[in-house]
Image (spheres, rainbow, N blue to C red):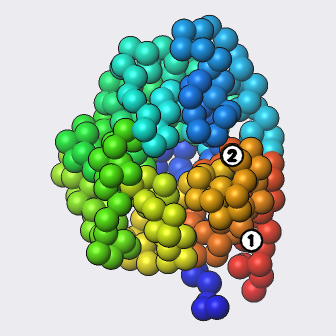
Amino acid sequence: MGQAIKRKHFKVPAGRFNLHLGSRTFIMGIINLTYDSFSKDGLLRSKKNTSFLARNALGLARKMKKNGADIIDIGGQSTRPGARPISVKEELTRVIPTVKTIASYLNIPISVDTYKPEVAEAAIEAGASIINNIMSSDLECNKQLAEVCAKKNRALVIMHIRGTPLNMQQFTKYKSVITEIKSELTKAINAALNSGLNFSNIIIDPGIGFAKTYQQNLEIINRLDEFVSLNRPILIGVSRKSFIGRALNLDVDERIFGTAACLALAVRNGSHIVRVHDCYEMAQVATMADAILNYN
């Protein structure tokens, strides 16, 4: 096995926070304000009942922070393969009270997983420090989100995807998966820069599971170090995903050890932030991987 990548160090401005990335792996804890997420952890028990979301999300966020989370990532819409979009109004109803509540009680950067500019703007006003955009393939959307983040000096995660969650698995043909992902991420980065966002505010995500096949997901983790040339911190989300289930023949709630293996190799290959459901266990995995990589 080749030599582990030595991570570059970055300071990413994110509102009142500065994310100092590189010396250790940051844990991003996932809070899904949904009823239909693939991971079976959505806090919404039906399409309509949102009254208890903020309270329950605050309890989960407190637990995540105690268990090692450095960032809380809040999503109001499922982006699993085949997921249909919800309205702006519905997403605002789910997300904004939760962001306000967590920002009021916890001193931790809050990320909001959205590609809707209206939701991003309202989330930032409510206390969000990071916008996590899965829709980098839509350059106009990326420009609008970049404009929103630039106004308030927030961080923007630019994730690779083709198509939308509803149809993305129709677009998995690549001649060279790493080369093409890098090229498409570069276009999205340039769109954000042309909208006034500073380069230092950008984080990249190769988009595990988004318009990717089983083999392509494995290749991305194995060759993650090749994304270093984009000169931005790398976020990766492998937690409980279906390619782990395929490799191990296990259901979504049995994939914790598979997630741990993917996470450790992602850290070895240069990931700065790992997006996870199981903060307690994955913080230990990341800390141990960091200790091995930084031993000298």
Q: Amino acid type of disc 2?
A: Val
Q: Which residue is mark 2?
A: 252
Q: Nearer the viewer, mark 2 or mark 1?
A: 2
146 left or right of 200? left
Q: Residue at x 80, y 69 (%)?
A: 288
Secondary structure at badge 2 equals helix
Q: Residue at x 59, y 24 (%)?
A: 35
Q: Amino acid type of disc 1?
A: Ala
Q: Which residue sits furthest front?
A: 249
Measured from the top left, where is residue 113 in percent x and y?
Answer: 47, 37
> Is residue 265 something one can see in this rendering?
yes
Figure check: 114 above or below 250: above
Residue 289 is labelled as 1
Q: Residue at x 49, y 58 (%)?
A: 208
Figure check: 58 above or below 128: above
Q: Earlier in the sequence, mark 2 or mark 1?
A: 2
